[in-house]
Image (tube, helix red, strand yellow):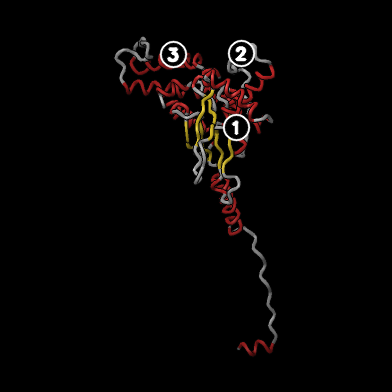
Amino acid sequence: MKFNGGMSAPAVDAQVPESDSSTRDRVIQLVVEEGPISAAQLGRELGLTAAAVRRHLDAMTEQGLVEVKNITSRRKGAGRPSRRYVISSRGQQELGDDYLALVRTALEVLEKHAAEEHGEPPTTLDAAGTGAGESKTEDSAAARAVAQAYFSQFEQRCSDELAQIEDLDGRTEKLAEFFNAAGFAGFTRLVGRDNPLLAMQSTQLCQGHCPVREIAEAHPVFCEEETAMIGRLLNVDVRRLSTQAAGAHVCTTHVPVGREKLAAERAARAQQDSEQTSPGARTAPRKRIVISPRQQERLS
């Protein structure tokens, strides 16, 4: 999936030709979506030589937009580690942040929280964002309330459209599009689709950018509430595999597509069996057996 047009692209030198600038945007997009990724893999995706891609990667590495990770193969006798590229913290910042909307939501929720819980005017916040004398428990409750209010806005925008999509794969792909449009660089990865065991098939819902990463680092409840929202929107139990707030280069949520398909098939078979065995169900006519008089004498 492509980045949202409203997101700010990483800064490039004004002297870089427009074609090079466009290529760099495509390179960093793939680093966000597919990283850790090698120069050779990027070249295959973009139809360029590894040397041409490496020229852009070297420039973005010098700018601090991407980082190099050395990946060692587990194969016996493997040579030196291979170079893989991931988005850096500075690169995440260049992709843009959404703190203005978050701060506005936080102020509204904190004012309401103070009025309802203490019956007093809103507490004056210090530089750390907490009020004088505020306890750790109150701070956690306030952070959860802010997270719920923040993600509820996103949930309201896309819940109706997602509810109309019956297929879980289709809902997951559409949700990735919503995340992408909201500045989270959403995309999906299909896992285990060649596995003969249907239950092992899944989809990974990924977010290559987190506009509220720094706040989520201080308040992990943001990741918890986002995960709960994803589960509600997809109408399935999901599991968070990684988050940028915890140090990963991409947020990844496991969606058990195969397990849900298997459960649906079993339910359909059970329904079919129930209909066939119900009192009102039509049964196959009995086969009529004709016995001759001589056969009757033998049987008697």
**Foreground of the two, 83 or 280:** 83
Q: Quadrant of residue 106?
A: top left
**Residue 171 as seen in the image, left or right of residue 211:** right
Q: Say whether residue 11 is visible.
A: yes
Q: Residues within 10 Å of mark 1 (few under 14, many from 20)?
A: many
Against 81, residue 200 (above or below) is below
Indicate which disc residue 13 carries. Answer: 2
Residue pointed to by mark 3? 107
Position in image of residue 131 (x %, y %): 34, 13
Who's the residue at 60% across and 15% down the image?
A: 12
Q: CA distance from mark 1 to mark 3?
A: 30 Å
Give the labeled residue for mark 1: 162
The residue lying at 34 percent from left, 11 percent from top is 120
| Callout 2–callout 3 Cβ contact below 8 Å | no
Task: Give the mark nearest the N terminus, 2 or 3.
Answer: 2
Q: Nearer the viewer, mark 2 or mark 3?
A: 2
Q: Nearer the viewer, residue 278 or 147?
A: 147
